[in-house]
Image (cartoon, helix red, strand yellow):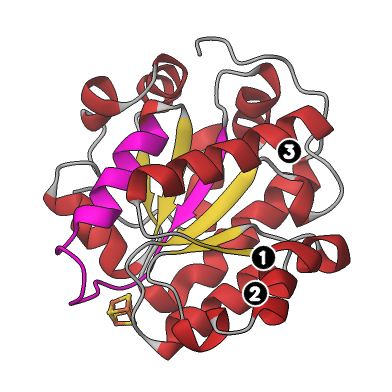
């Protein structure tokens, strides 16, 4: 695996040591070569087949030209499947993402640290906003988050700050203590979006998770009036 993609290193990989910038990433999304971004993070859950949700979801996302940012046990699951090396782009990624990975020599799945480093993903997202062309708020970016096999309270806490920052965030195993209430479920999965830009979703099928995230990314692309995807 290749790890260590901090938000600063991503600047330099994309722009070079003397002109560190997120511009190539923004332009790839704006031009339709890249569909968008996904943060896939979190635990392994003993109630689910080990690693299956992480690897199935991530393979489906990169196949659809979504660059995946990862942390924690989710990143390790994908590393074991060989997804965290540049060569993985040729085998698993869609043509647009393949072109980006080949041009800058990165894997289609970027390991950004341990599960307490999720804040790096949001900082990278705020640099994308600063670079320009993809909206004014984190909720404008064609991006989505997911914790497909979460099991710890910490994962829910992290999910809350992603949603509160404006990110559409899908959780794998449903927190049953929440879904018992129709009103609260509606608030978390629908109403919140109108208030803070982000919302939760709950789903227990990794391919359906990918579909939900891609639908959200496409919705954000339409809202920004971005060009059609080059290869899909
Ligand atoms: S809390 Fe972090 S280290 Fe613990 S299982 Fe979840 S992702 Fe892994």
- Of the residues under marks 2 and 3, which one precedes in the sequence? 2
Q: Position of residue 182 (x, y in %)?
A: 66, 77
Span colored in magenta = 36-62
Residue at the (12%, 52%) spot, across then down? 80
Q: Is residue 52 magenta?
A: yes
Question: Looking at the picture, does residue 72 appear above or below residue 230?
Answer: below
Residue 220, numbered label: 3
Question: Looking at the picture, does residue 30 appear above or below residue 154?
Answer: above
Helix, strand, or loop for circle 2?
Answer: helix
Q: Is residue 204 left or right of residue 166?
A: left
Q: Which residue is mark 2?
A: 185
Q: Is residue 188 magenta?
A: no
Q: Are marks 1 and 2 in contact (CB under 8 Å)?
A: yes
Q: Quadrant of residue 46?
A: bottom left
Using the numbered discs, state the Cα–Cα distance from disc 1 to disc 3 in whole angstroms: 17 Å
Q: Is residue 31 left or right of residue 15?
A: right
Quarter of the rendered image showing ligand 1: bottom left
Helix, strand, or loop for circle 1?
Answer: helix
Helix, strand, or loop for circle 3?
Answer: helix
Q: Which residue is mark 1?
A: 189
């Amino acid at each position: 695996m290749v790890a260590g993609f901090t938000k600063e290193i991503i600047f330099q990989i994309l722009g070079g040591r003397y002109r560190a910038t997120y511009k190539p990433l923004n332009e790839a999304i704006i031009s339709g070569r890249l569909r968008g971004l996904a943060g896939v993070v979190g635990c392994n859950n003993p109630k689910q087949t080990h690693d299956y949700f992480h690897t199935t979801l991530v393979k489906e996302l990169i196949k659809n030209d979504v660059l995946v940012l990862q942390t924690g046990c989710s990143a390790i699951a994908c590393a074991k499947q060989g997804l965290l090396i540049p060569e993985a782009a040729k085998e698993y990624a869609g043509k647009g993402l393949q072109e980006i990975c080949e041009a800058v020599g990165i894997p289609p799945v970027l390991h950004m640290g341990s599960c307490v480093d999720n804040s790096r993903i949001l900082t990278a997202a705020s640099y994308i906003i600063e670079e320009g062309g993809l909206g004014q708020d984190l909720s404008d970016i064609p991006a989505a988050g997911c914790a497909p096999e979460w099991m710890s309270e910490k994962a829910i806490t992290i999910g809350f700050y992603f949603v509160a920052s404006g990110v559409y965030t899908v959780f794998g195993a449903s927190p049953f203590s929440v879904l018992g209430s129709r009103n609260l479920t509606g608030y978390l999965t629908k109403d919140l979006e109108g208030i803070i830009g982000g919302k939760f979703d709950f789903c227990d099928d990794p391919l359906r998770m990918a579909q939900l995230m891609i639908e959200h990314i496409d919705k954000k692309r339409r809202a920004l009036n971005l060009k059609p995807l080059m290869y899909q």
